[in-house]
Image (cartoon, rainbow, N blue to C red):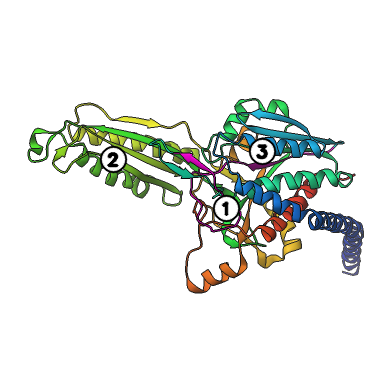
């Protein structure tokens, strides 16, 4: 027994000694990492403090001068010139008005940072002194305003500001930085166009990609994030149902496409409720239905427009196949004189996936300077975001976080009164510039430095 006790005590002593040694060895490593993070934070904060007034002016200029998707010529030229002045090797007109700036700074990881540039056909109603006065013509010849109602003016300002910051701090990191200014995100086309135009033949393969997007339901100075699926597959489907027109008083002599379309709309709702697994997110929405011109005339056709949302490729395929099958079957049942026309538009935007490990790293970086209470895990949404195309094309991890933009007083008032805040794409959406940009720059700069190499 004494011998056994001695053996056990000796084994315990070896284990304890090992743990102590591991602790001694680990403490300097942890301390060095903490020191690096502290130095990064101090350098970023000092740069942002000096540059913020000028970048707020940049934001206001961009807000006043929005450009629609596929028309971002001036915004792209501004981004390209800013990157050149900061020392980047710049390529322009990639997939339309896409811009990339590459800054090589020794051996280390390659990091891609993306910002989108396009605005929306929305007449601004914010009342801001720097509100957009830009206009565009609708297909019918009437005019509508052009507005950065989705915050891409914040995105561009943050992108070029971060690029300038990291160029100024190049003594603190090693690797290659790729700054990507993307057109046509609102159409779901920009990322695809840049990839098809040889984006990945022009840059080193990224080890990571990061981006931010404004958030209309978080106060400025806060950050939200989603780990895993964060934005949906987005498909647009056009359907034309053919009938045989006639007099509204003699429906028996006609084949009514209005009734057929009405029945189809209700049948389409059974796809999500009865064909998709209840734990899989999916949406089928009929957003537009047009047919007929007068009370007593049965028309020859009815046109429908659908938006279809999902996360997985399997559910996407199920939704689209089901829409086609139900539409064809309904038209057959109602004796339509010819099969329906069903067009799945090429504006498909694939689902965006935030790498869980990269998301966790980002959250930790943000919490270190904002505090845990101002960094919030958010639910996934069914909106579209073509940032997902980049990592799907080449398989590297990516992370997009949400940047709070709402003025603190307005946010608190809306919360107390139970009133909704102006959403993205609203004519009344107006970020609070200074705290929004300050938080975005500090967050993007810190996260970038944590992903790049050390000198």
Label 2 SS? strand
Instruction: Indicate whether 102 appears above or below 135.
Output: above
Does residue 6 appear to the left or right of 253 in the view shown?
Answer: right
- Real-space Cα separation, disc 2 to disc 3, in angstroms: 38 Å
- Give the quadrant of the N terminus: bottom right
Q: Which of 214 and 204 is in front in this view?
A: 214
Label 1 SS? loop
Q: Position of residue 366 (x, y in %)?
A: 72, 58
Label 3 SS? strand
- First reached walking from the N terminus: tag 1 or tag 3: 1
Residue 125 located within the stretch drawn in magenta: yes
The residue positioned 41% from the left and 32% from the top of the image is: 344
Disc sitting over residue 131 in the figure: 1
Camera sees residue 400: no
Foreground mark, 1 or 3? 1
Q: Position of residue 128 (x, y in %)?
A: 58, 58
| Extent of the magenta region | 108-137
- Real-space Cα separation, disc 1 to disc 3, in angstroms: 23 Å
**Alpha-carbon neighbours of circle 2 within 10 Å: few (<14), some, or many (≥20)?**
few
Does residue 429 appear to the left or right of 74 in the view shown?
Answer: left
Instruction: Indicate whether 385 appears above or below 341.
Output: below
Q: Where is residue 152 in the image (x, y as percent from the top left)?
A: 60, 46
Disc sitting over residue 454 in the figure: none
**Alpha-carbon neighbours of circle 3 within 10 Å: few (<14), some, or many (≥20)?**
many
- Real-space Cα separation, disc 2 to disc 1, in angstroms: 35 Å
Does residue 347 appear to the left or right of 322 in the view shown?
Answer: right
Quadrant in the rendering for residue 267: top left
Disc sitting over residue 290 in the figure: 2
Q: Say which residue label 3 marks.
A: 181
Q: Nearer the viewer, residue 316 or 131?
A: 131
């Amino acid at each position: 027994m004494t011998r056994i006790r001695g053996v056990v005590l000796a084994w315990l002593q070896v284990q304890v000694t090992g743990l102590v040694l591991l602790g001694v060895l680990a403490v300097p490593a942890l301390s060095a990492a903490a020191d690096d993070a502290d130095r990064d934070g101090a350098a970023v904060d000092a740069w942002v403090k000096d540059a913020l007034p000028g970048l707020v002016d940049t934001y206001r200029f961009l807000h006043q001068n929005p450009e629609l998707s596929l028309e971002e010529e001036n915004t792209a030229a501004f981004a390209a010139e800013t990157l050149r002045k900061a020392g980047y090797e710049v390529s322009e007109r990639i997939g339309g008005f896409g811009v990339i700036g590459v800054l090589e700074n020794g051996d280390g990881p390659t990091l891609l940072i993306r910002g989108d540039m396009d605005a929306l056909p929305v007449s601004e109603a914010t009342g801001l002194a720097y509100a957009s006065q830009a206009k565009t013509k609708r297909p019918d010849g009437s005019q509508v305003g052009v507005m950065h109602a989705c915050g891409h003016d914040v995105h561009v300002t943050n992108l070029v500001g971060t690029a300038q910051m990291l160029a100024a701090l190049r003594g603190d990191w090693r690797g290659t930085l790729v700054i990507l200014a993307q057109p046509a995100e609102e159409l779901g086309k920009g990322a695809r166009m840049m990839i098809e135009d040889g984006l990945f033949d022009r840059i080193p393969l990224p080890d990571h990609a990061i981006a931010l997007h404004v958030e209309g339901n978080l106060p400025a100075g806060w950050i939200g994030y989603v780990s895993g699926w964060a934005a949906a597959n987005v498909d647009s489907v056009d359907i034309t149902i053919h009938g045989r027109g006639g007099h509204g008083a003699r429906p028996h002599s006609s084949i009514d496409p209005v009734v057929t379309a009405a029945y189809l709309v209700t049948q389409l709702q059974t796809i999500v409720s009865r064909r998709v697994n209840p734990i899989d997110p999916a949406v089928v929405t009929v957003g537009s239905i047009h047919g007929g011109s007068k009370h007593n005339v049965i028309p020859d056709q009815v046109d429908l427009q659908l938006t279809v949302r999902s996360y997985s490729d399997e559910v996407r395929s199920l939704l689209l196949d089901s829409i086609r099958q139900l539409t064809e079957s309904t038209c057959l049942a109602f004796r339509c004189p010819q099969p329906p026309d069903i067009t799945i538009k090429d504006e498909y935007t694939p689902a965006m996936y935030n790498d869980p490990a990269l998301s966790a790293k980002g959250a930790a970086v943000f919490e270190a300077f904002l505090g845990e209470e101002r960094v919030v895990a958010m639910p996934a949404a069914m909106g579209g975001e073509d940032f997902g195309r980049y990592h799907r094309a080449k398989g590297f991890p990516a992370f997009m976080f949400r940047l709070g933009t709402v003025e603190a007083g307005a946010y608190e008032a809306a919360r107390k009164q139970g009133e909704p805040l102006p959403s993205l794409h609203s004519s009344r959406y107006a970020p609070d510039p200074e705290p929004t940009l300050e938080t975005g720059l500090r967050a993007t700069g810190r996260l970038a430095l944590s992903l790049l190499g050390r000198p």
